[in-house]
Structures are given as C-alpha cells and as structure tokens.
Amino acid sequence: MAIENGVLYIVATPIGNLGDMTARAIDVLRAVDVIAAEDTRHSLPLLRHFGIKTPLLAFHEHNERDVGPAIIRRLQEGQAVALISDAGTPLISDPGYQLVRLARDQGIKVSPVPGASALIAALSVAGLPTDRFVFEGFLPARAAARQERLKQLRDETRTLVFYESSHRIVEALRDMAEVFGAEREAVLVRELTKRFETVRGDSLGNLCRWVQDDVDQQKGEFVLLVHGAPPVEEDAVRAEAERVLRVLLEELPVKQAVGIAVRLTGLKKNLLYQQAVRIQDEEAGG
C-alpha cells in the first residue's frame, strides 16, 4: 500500500477479537517508518500476529511531553508515523491528544485509519437513545470526586457513556444508583468482542446488585451506559421560578431574592431578574 510521507496516521486496532483488524490498518502499519504504541509489550503480539515488523516506539501518558517533539521531528523529516493505543481507537480515553494538536499546529497532515471503538460498539447494542449522547470517559477514582461528577450529570438528558475498570465497577454502579436514582435505566457492557462478552440492561439498582452478587461480572473491561434524565418542561420550571420569586420578594430586596432563586431553580440570573422586575411592576400597578 502506498502511504504519504510525513503523515501521522491514527490507527484503530481491535478491542478484543483480532478479526476486527481492518485490512487498511494492517497495510498502513506495515508501510510506515515507525509505530508509536501506548505499551510496546502489549502491542508486539498483535503486530506479530499480522506479520507487521515495523519498529516500535513507546508513547504513553508518562512520556508524551518528551517523546511528542521527537515524533514531530521524524514527521518533519518526511517519515510516516502510525499511532496506536493498547486497544481500539487512539485518543478515546487514551494518550495522543497533545501529539495530534502539535502536529496540526506544525502543518503536518493527520490521517485517521478507522476501526474498532468500545464507545461506539457499546452504543450500537445498548438499546438506548443514540441520536444525542455524551461520553464521560473514566469517572474519578476517589469516591467523593466521583459522586460530585455524577451530581453534575444528574439532570443531563442525553445518554451518558462511561468507561470503568474491574476494581471500581461495583462502587461506580452503587454511586450511580444513589445519585441518578436506583430506577434509572442503564446498560452494562463487558468484555466487548471477547469470549465472555456481556450486554445487560436493567435499572441501576438491579445492575448493582447483580454485579455485587456475581464476582465473574466484576472482571474485565466495562462500558456503562445510562439513560438520560427526563427533560424538564420549560414552562413548569418558569412557573416554579415565578412562585419562588413571589415568595422571596415579599421579604427580600430584588437582588437578594434573585440570588436565592438562581440557586433554587438553576435558571439564569438575568432571566430571573427580569421576571422579578415584572412581578414588582405588576404588584405596584395592582
């Protein structure tokens, strides 16, 4: 396969089943001058399986700042470079963002070689709305930070997608059930394209109990998908905001009443201020 010199190729690799390796990915990895791999020890068996003998260069989150400029120099000298992650599509919760940005800033062409992605694969089988979704990657490891992040997402109406590790899956499900509500619909996807692939949809509460009770379901790599919150009717919110403002304005000045109403309703300050002024004008005229 003919490739372009001085191009950074972002190459997707299988997330489990080696049959998902694309013919183009194999051709590109054979043809480039060097492959930047997240973990060379992990990638070497994959490359050997497909008869790819291209030299490897370690490129991961701990050396990205140092190795990135060296890769850029190779590209500027006319070498073709491929970037791969341990599995799936690079940069999706993996290192590489800074390298791609630096390459583009230097006028270097960056070309994708699409393939497997756990995010997209999970969405395709979950049976949840996919017209609008938000990918949150991995939640924070610490419980307090994880719960705070989930609270920020509690009212998100789009389908939520998370990656999670085996040693935190129970805690993540437990926190989701507590913050989003045990009855919120969710889908747990485990070990995609591998021997023990699992796709199970249920309420967050039931999923949490199921995983807690079965240690086999606590193993592997996970994608968690959570149905978005039901949309709040705008008219109902505005009506509640007006009720709150009328009560507050009976006891407080406009500025203070609006400040409290912002915290209670989540609506924008300028909108509530206009509403408060209108209420005052109505009462003064009436």
Image (tube, rainbow, N blue to C red):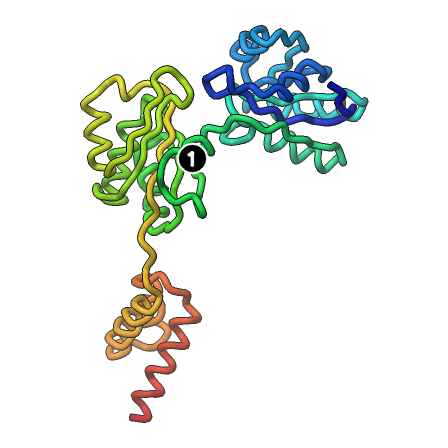
Q: Is 44 placed left or right of 73 in the picture? A: left
Residue 1 drawn at (x, y percent): 73, 18
Quarter placement of the C terminus? bottom left
Q: Nearer the viewer, residue 241 or 1?
A: 1
In this view, 118 is above or below 196: below
In this view, 52 is above or below 78: above
Per the image, the residue denoted by label 1 is 124
Crowdedness of circle 1 by 10 Å Cα count: few (<14), some, many (20+)? few
Which residue does the image show at 75% across and 35% down from the upper left?
A: 106
| Residue type at numbered disc 1 | Ser
In this view, 57 is above or below 130: above
Q: Is 126 placed left or right of 99 in the picture? A: left
Which residue does the image show at 35% across and 61% down from the upper left?
A: 266
Label 1 sits on a secondary structure element that is helix
Please give the count of numbered marks on the rendered protein. 1
Quadrant of the image occupied by residue 273 = bottom left
Residue 26 drawn at (x, y percent): 63, 16
Most extreme residue toward the bottom, as rendered?
A: 285
Quadrant of the image occupied by residue 135 = top left
Q: Is 109 placed left or right of 274 in the picture? A: right
Quadrant of the image occupied by residue 214 = top left
Residue 77 drawn at (x, y percent): 81, 22
Q: Is 67 placed left or right of 203 in the picture? A: right
Residue 38 drawn at (x, y percent): 56, 19
Which residue does the image show at 21% across and 43% down from the upper left?
A: 183
Q: Nearer the viewer, residue 259 or 18?
A: 18
Which residue does the image show at 30% across and 74% down from the upper left?
A: 242
